[in-house]
Amino acid sequence: MITHFPTTGASDLLLGILDGSPNGIVAYQPIRNEAGIIIDYETVYYNAQARMLLGYTDTDFRQGTLFQRFPAARALETAYMPLIQNNQPFIHESYFKRAGRWVQTQARRLGDGFFLIFSDITTRKEAEVSLIHRNQLLDGVINTFLSGITAFEPIMNDAGEVIDFRVTLVNDGALLLLGGGYTREQLLGNTLIQLYPETQEQGMFHHYLAVYRTGQSIRTSHFYPVPQKWIDLSIQKTETGLLVTYNDITEQKQAEQQLQQSANMLQNVLDGVQSGVISCKSVRDEKGHIIDFEVLSTNQQVCLIMQQPAEHLIGQRMLSLFPTKRKNGLFDRYVIVVETGEKQQIEQEFREDGLNAWFDITAIRQGDGLVLTLLDISERKQAQLDLARQKDQLTAIFESSPNGIIAMRAIRDDSGQPIDFLMEKANSTTTVMTGHTPDQIVGTRLLTTFPGNADGGFLAIYQRVVTTGQPEQATQYYRDEKGLEAWFNVSAVRQGSDNVVVTFSDVTTAQRTQQQLRESNESLEQFAGVASHDLQEPLRKVQSFGNLLSQQFGPQLGESGQDLIQRMQSAADRMSILIRDLLAYSRLTNLPDISNSLDLNVLVSEVLIDLETRVADKKAVIDISTLPTLRANNLTIRQLIQNLIGNALKFSRPGVRPHIRISAEKVRGKQLPASLPTPQASSYWAIRVADNGIGFDDQYKDRIFGAFQRLHSRNSVYPGTGIGLAIVKKVVEQHNGGIEARGQVGEGATFTVYLPA
């Protein structure tokens, strides 16, 4: 120990205290040059603890000055001068290699020098170094994380409320993800709102506050416009604030968005199709058996079918939506699809919960479930059912028809001309008419089974029909070497391009009756001619003798005798007219030829020429519209028109100029008055003759068409026999038509003739 202190009792006590101090103590006095400038320091005191701490011996302290012993101390020379001159103490920490320990040095002024107090801080320094190493290691580990990590501490106002968060830690991952161009130094110590003010606008700041206040961690995803990334955030509370972990999920989000876009596109496609599509997953019991299916998704068509929104269907059990699926076997078939992977296609009718429809269902396995495609086939199924019913009805009609029906297909030669027909279908009535059963007919040729068709002219009809497509009807005599002989009425219609359907009936009895009727009519016509001649001859003699009596013996007979002769002459005239009308009426018993084309415009013009004198006498006005051309008999239709116009002239009102209107319009068969016979044609020409004459009471509209039926007395001013309208009706009937009369007394009458168009 070196000391320059006085050795009084008090100093001995002080030295004892210093020597026993746990700290090392060394005192120095300055060494000055001739100019009084301090150039070094000499040791004036040191204790044992200083020797131990610094690793020096007594010799080391006694020999040499401060700067000689510790050359590195010159680095502190600038600190010693203020200490000596201005009493500014300082503390310094350094490592003494000689002693192998860290020492803290406290410098204090002592007189003209100073003393140093040394403390062993090796343990603390080693702990600090260890902590630094650990922190460096932790920083290295944190910075190697792909995730961004940021630590925050709360910033509070005077009221203790958190108003912001200060950044206390940022790893490299956070700088890359959300640095926004900031360096670590710029981020550390800065606040969340100052760095990212948009967190308040976008609501993220409230998440930070909520975690700090409640301690409940939050995980959310958020899109940051800068740097255009989706970030997955995990916010946790720590002892000092918050720890936020960031992960870049941009690619994942983009993949999800693309997947969602694809899903939306698929859903739009599914919603656009006419089929309903349902995706289901299996619902299994503890043993793994499928007990139901849960609806995962549907398209819009399913919602329309079920009349429920998708959210009401998704998550529902299939058997709760369609309880009948277990009864009708559909559920079991769905189970087979899932268990075996075998596709199932089913047509099924549903009648439950207001649903009444047929569906074509396709079931395909998908994972541990299935996809069902439902196509509403109600219209098609109904059409099939209707077609089946129609087929049954047609079969019933076909088999129950009183006429024989044979469907045939043309057999053609090399040039394509039909030379025969293959009979493909025949009804049971053909057996009655031909003696051949359907089994004997079907599959055979026409000319093989019924050879008489060639000579009878039937084959030519069928050939024309299959070639032209125009239906034909004929009544002809059939005879073949197999013994079949009869008159047949045949109707042939082409079906498709190569088939002919023939409907025929045995009219042998009718033909014989018609032949007998023709013969009877011929006899009647001969009789009527003879009778007319034989009756007219006596009448002419009566009329001649009456004229002679009136001329030669009139004066002798007087007025009374002449009146009798006049009555006799009038009766003879009426008798002559009656005989002529009867002859005309009787001649209508023969069926006229109505197959010729007849232009009514020409015919009416010719009739008016015949009635020219009567029209002129009456000063009648006759309006004629455009009239049709139709199939009719010229002679009988002429008689019909002449009788109707003649009646209109005859039954005109005295003092009133006759006005006759002749017109025509086309009407459908079902529009004919119910009082007329059942229409036999699809359309008719309605030919009207209307006048402004005396008319008649409508209650007599049917009576006026009877023979010899007159609405006026024999002595009235309107002569006639009552045969004219009977002839008109007979002509109409011969043309398969009808006639209707309408009248009003004092205003006129209208006669409408309906003839097939």
Image (spheres, helix red, strand yellow):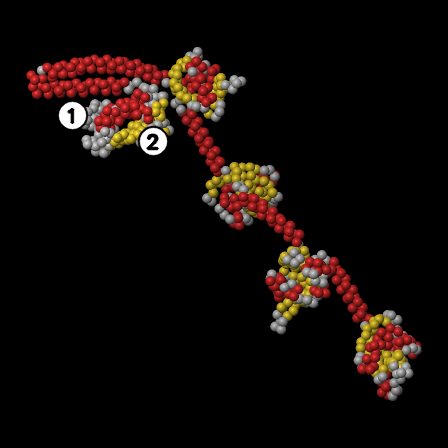
Is residue 491 placed above or below 673 in the rendered structure?
above
- From this viewpoint, is residue 594 visible? yes
Tell me where residue 125 appears, x and y as whole percent: 80, 70
> Which of the two residues, 485 or 592, is positioned nearer the viewer here?
592
Q: Amino acid at mark 1?
A: Asn
Residue 665 appears left or right of 100: left
Which label's residue is closer to the chain start, 1 or 2?
2
Residue 73 lies in quadrant: bottom right
Mark 1, residue position: 715
Residue marked by disc 2:
665
Spatial separation of the CA atoms under disc 1 and disc 2: 39 Å
Residue kind at label 2, given as amino acid type: Glu
Location of residue 514 (image quadrant): top left
Residue at the extreme bottom: 8
Residue positioned 16% across, 16% down in the render: 543
Q: Secondary structure at mark 2?
A: strand
Q: Which residue is farthest top?
A: 481
In front here: 570 or 322? 570
Residue 509 vertical placement versus 227 (above, below): above
Is 329 placed left or right of 53 in the picture?
left
Q: Which residue occupies 44% across, 17% down?
A: 460
